[in-house]
Amino acid sequence: MYSYETDLDVTKLETEGQVTRLFLGSDVVIEIPSRFSSGIGKKVHVKISEEKDDPSKWSIYMWGIVYASSDNSYKASAGGFIISINNASNVPQVGTKLYIGIKY
């Protein structure tokens, strides 16, 4: 069962219309609605797992499907928002449903 959980700093923000890309550390990029974006340098707790969690514990909680996977990276789409993880120690298979929690 796949699970990834860590605390990361927001290192860069890119906003296009109503979508903001949070660059977290050097290996994680998560797209979120712009109204939920945070500032550069802010610490963000991220959990990506096949197991559903209590949504009330998270600032943002969504689920998505892995659509691309390689030896050490993958991409998932959650309602059109893209989650990209590079340099992962283990990688879920294409088609895996993942729950994504983000806490500011």
Image: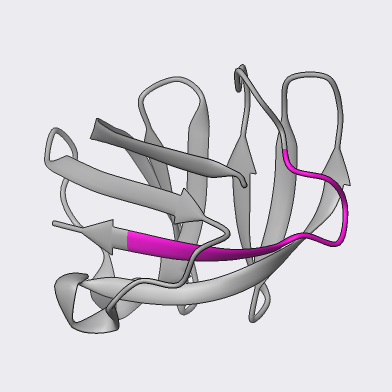
| Along the line of sight, the residue nearer the viewer: 92 or 28 | 92
Quadrant of residue 72 in the image? Answer: top right
**Number of numbered discs present?**
0
| Along the line of sight, the residue nearer the viewer: 74 or 31 | 74
Seen in the picture, residue 99 relative to 93 is either above or below; the reply is below
The image shows residue 99 at horizontal and vertical percentages of 51, 66
The image shows residue 88 at horizontal and vertical percentages of 60, 22
Residue placed at 35% from the left, 71% from the top? Answer: 53
**Span colored in magenta:** 92-101
Quadrant of residue 42 in the image? Answer: top left
Query: In the drawing, does residue 4 fall left or right of residue 81?
Result: left
Residue placed at 21% from the left, 70% from the top? Answer: 58
Q: Is residue 99 magenta?
A: yes
Seen in the picture, residue 52 relative to 103 is either above or below; the reply is below
Residue placed at 86% from the left, 28% from the top? Answer: 70
Query: In the drawing, does residue 29 fall left or right of residue 55?
Result: right
Query: In the drawing, does residue 76 fall left or right of residue 69?
Result: left
Residue placed at 20% from the left, 45% from the top? Answer: 44
Q: Is residue 70 magenta?
A: no
| Along the line of sight, the residue nearer the viewer: 20 or 87 | 87
The image shows residue 28 at horizontal and vertical percentages of 49, 34
